[in-house]
Image: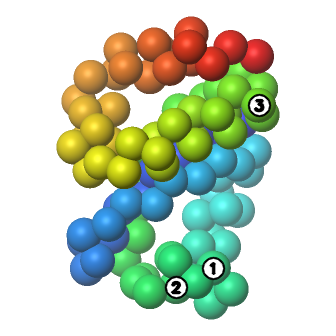
Amino acid sequence: MHTVYILFSEKLDRFYTGETTDLDKRIAFHMDSPANKFTAKAKDWKLFLQFQCECKPQALKIERHIKNMKSKTYIRNLLKYPEIIDKLKKEYPC
């Protein structure tokens, strides 16, 4: 299964959206590795939201959709209104 995840940094007041098959390993990478220039800017990243997708192409399309929205309000609404995620999965099928 592929997971779309969103991290939040209170220090930066920013979200980071990504896709992975191993969420624990990926979060550890963000926390420990200076290689990722965006997430290296802060050490207080917390998992804000995660959800499973049926296949990698679906997960990548949803990740791109969220990033293209460029909206903190939209990301917060994903948590507040889970039906948005269901609509995204239908909009971007495998």
Q: Residue at x 48, y 48 (%)?
A: 67
Q: Is residue 57 left or right of residue 18?
A: right
Quadrant of the frame with the N terminus: top right
**Are discs 1 and 2 less than 8 Å apart at CB?**
yes
**Please, is residue 6 above or below residue 44 in the view?**
above
The amino acid pointed to by label 3 is Pro
Which residue carries the number 2 mark? 40
Q: Residues within 10 Å of mark 1 (few under 14, many from 20)?
A: few
Give the secondary structure at mark 1. Answer: loop
Position in image of residue 35 (x %, y %): 68, 86
The residue at which mark 3 appears reads as: 57
Q: From this viewpoint, is residue 1 visible?
A: no
* Circle 2 SS class: helix
Whichever of callouts 1 and 3 sits on the residue coming sooner in the sequence is 1
Mark 3 or mark 2, earlier in chain: 2
The amino acid marked with disc number 1 is: Asn
For residue 15, above or below residue 41? above
Residue 55 rendering spot, x and y as whole percentages: 77, 26
Q: Name the residue beneath numbered marker 1.
A: 36
Residue at x-position 52% and y-position 85%: 40
Q: Is residue 17 above or below residue 55?
A: below
Is the residue under label 3 in contact with that under label 1 (CB below 8 Å)? no
Is residue 16 found left or right of 81 in the rendered image? right
- CA gap between label 3 and label 2 equals 27 Å
